[in-house]
Amino acid sequence: MLNGSIGTTRRARRGMLREWRLHALSVFSLAVAFVCLGAALLVLTNLRAIEERWSRAGRASIYLKDNAPAQDVEQLKTALSAVQGIVGVRYVSPAQARQDFGQTEAGPKAALAALPVDAFPASLEIEVRPDVTDSELESMVGKLKQLPAVDDVETYQAWTERLSRLIRGGVAAAALLALVVFASVLAVVGSTIRLALQRRRTEVEVLKLVGASDRFIKGPFLVEGSAQGALGAAGAVALLAALFFVVRGRLDAELAGLVGVEPSFLPWYVVVGMIGVGMVLGTVAALLGLRRLVTV
């Protein structure tokens, strides 16, 4: 059985080398299709990382009223420090807020830093334990908003919810794109295998005359289809990786700091899955392409 598999692989390799232009065009077409799918998965991967980071931010900003007495603010800070679930409280004065915005010398932050100190609200930045649930945090926020010295409370959950809706829409779009890619793989590989079989019609007829089984005849074509699918997916991953690292190298570090995560490439299991799916689809497409031309 091992010798038969080796022989089938060798015949498939000879066939692909003999008609390398045909197979190279097929692999290129598959790579283009898989690049589209891989790019969608790459965007979703990083959006999920941002969602997870934001959902576990564990912090909230309590914006204070302009006329809030310093004594009330200090009492509020002391009371918050004693609340179960809060691990840290930091007071940010208007001057400190403007200084934080003025860390850069150009851009929107510099324009904001040029505003007077009164344009920036004072706030209390609190950190909560990761095990605090959303309902507990909402209850805490509701109570804080009722305090006379508090103007508003920002927990950043609204942004997380918006991002979650965006990701759900992206997953649906990626699923639809995957169906289009799968159909493209079946069509491209199936057409390539049929054309390869037509070019080797004489060879196939001679094999059948000498008593070769249909499995023996089909074997190299199935290997070729599988190889086309795997090479197309692998080429797409390599191209995506090159583009990703070029873009990441030029990405502003402040943007990564703003969203809270560094851009990451596709996880290894997604890469392996793409190549495996390409291999399986290539084999199925080859089977469909041979169905009418070689009897079972």
Image (cartoon, rainbow, N blue to C red):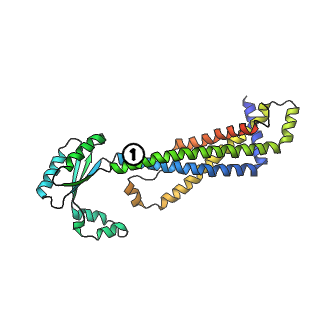
Q: Which residue is mark 1?
A: 52
Identified at 34% across, 50% down, the residue is 158
Residue 145 visible in the picture: yes
Instruction: Give the camera-side residue of 255 and 173.
Output: 173
Q: Specify the farthest residue to the top.
A: 1
Q: Within the image, what quadrant is residue 110 found in?
A: bottom left
Image position, residue 14 (x, y; %): 78, 43
Image position, residue 187 (x, y; %): 69, 45
State left or right for residue 154 relative to residue 266.
Answer: left
Quadrant including the N terminus? top right
Identified at 21% across, 60% down, the residue is 122
Image height check: is 121 above or below 77?
A: below
Image position, residue 255 (x, y; %): 41, 59
Mark 1: which secondary structure? helix
Instruction: Give the camera-side residue of 145 and 83.
Output: 145
Exactly how many numbered labels are in the figure? 1
Instruction: Give the camera-side residue of 140 and 260.
Output: 140
Residue 132 visible in the picture: no
State left or right for residue 231 relative to residue 242.
Answer: right
Quadrant including the C terminus? top right
Image position, residue 168 (x, y; %): 46, 45
Q: Specify the farthest residue to the left.
A: 71
10 Å crowding of disc 1: few (<14), some (14-19), many (20+): some
User: Three-letter amino acid code at disc 1?
Assistant: Glu
